[in-house]
Image (tube, rainbow, N blue to C red):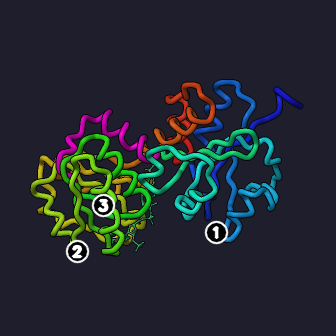
Amino acid sequence: MGLNKKQIYGLIGYPVKHSFSAAMHNAAFTHLGINAEYRLFEIKPQELMYFFHKIIPLRDISGAEFSYDDLRGFNVTIPHKEMVMKFLNEKSTAVNDIKAVNTISVHNGNEFKGFNTDFSGFARHLTDMDVITDKVGIIGAGGAARAVAYALKVKKAGEIVVYDINRQKAEALADDVNSWDSGCTAYAVDTIDSLNLYDKTLLVNASPVGMKDNDPLLIPVQMLHKDLFVYDLIYAPAQTKLLMLAKDRGLRCRNGLKMLLYQGVLAFEHWLGIDAPEDIMFEALKGAMN
Ligand code: NAP
């Protein structure tokens, strides 16, 4: 009991079984000798309220049951990143602007504080690689794209152009970027061609297109010019058609694996208030993916 009680962390979403987060967090706990465990909790949309009010049993995907009293923090994934906002007692500034949460810390048993480490993880990876973020094209306008746009604002991007098959979502994201009042101008376009990549320094794929073998290549090959950095948020597969083509043409490019690592590292640091063992987490992540 007391000080030695195992702390529980985890992921809530629906579905969650393909997540690699448990491998990286559990490796970190083991490495640091922390009595904690990261588990995957499948919570259906209609169960979300009951989870936050601790009405349903806290059962992970293997069927093991835990006490809510031991839950110290958790990540949030599809489809709950926006819905969880209303259950939070406190939100970071980024969460208020992005309107999506991927990390929650639990205080005094039932106070929830929300963060967005998708944004800070992406920003950190861009910094690592010294990417010029002057003029950027984004494909997709969902939760990940919103985090990407916020990171670009922080990185002092000048112009963001957004394309999504759902024009309204692209417009809503562009409107939000413009409301952040950062000197970054954003607008939505109707077609990939209108992204006008010829004068862009960075293209970010924040849509799920590329995850499946038979997904089309969204970008006409002639739009991939040598000064364009191509960032695909997808990390499985490691090489999407877009990345393969960019690489073939000699462009600088990356997949989203380091973003995934950094969002986990930053979540760990929010929860425990100590430096995360990044190398250990990265090795565990790569191991789990293989
Ligand atoms: P999401 O909320 O579903 O958003 C995806 C957006 O892309 C939706 O607005 C969707 O429109 C749009 N879209 C679908 N097909 C498109 C197409 N052909 N052209 C343009 N837009 C299209 O998903 P998300 O959470 O933002 O995630 C997006 C991707 O990022 C996923 O592949 C996810 O795995 C990846 N991701 C990676 C990391 C990381 O750490 N590396 C973190 C978060 C997400 P509809 O809603 O109309 O379908």
Position of 252 with respect to 77 (left or right) is: left
Q: Amino acid at mark 3?
A: Lys
The residue to which callout 1 is attached is: 45
Q: Is residue 118 magenta?
A: yes
Residue 222: x and y in percent read: 11, 62
The residue to which callout 3 is attached is: 241
Q: Amino acid at mark 1?
A: Pro
Element carrying mark 2: loop
Q: Is residue 210 magenta?
A: no
Residue 190: which numbered mark, if any? Answer: 2
Element carrying mark 1: helix
- Quarter holding residue 6: top right
Number of marks drawn: 3
- Rendered residue at 75%/58% (across/down): 53
- Rendered residue at 81%/52% (across/down): 64
Position of 170 with respect to 82 (left or right) is: left
Q: Is residue 236 or residue 263 the one in the foreground?
A: 263
Disc 1 from disc 2: Cα separation: 31 Å
Mark positioned earlier in the residue sequence (1 or 2): 1
Q: Is residue 176 or residue 133 the one in the foreground?
A: 176
Q: Is residue 97 above or below residue 130?
A: below
- Rendered residue at 29%/54% (across/down): 204
Residue 33: x and y in percent read: 70, 24
- Quarter holding residue 46: bottom right
Q: Amino acid at mark 2?
A: Asp
Residue contact at pointers 1 and 3, CB within 8 angstroms:
no
Position of 241 with respect to 285 (left or right) is: left
Q: Give the residues drawn in magenta, as a range.
A: 117-136
Mark positioned earlier in the residue sequence (1 or 3): 1
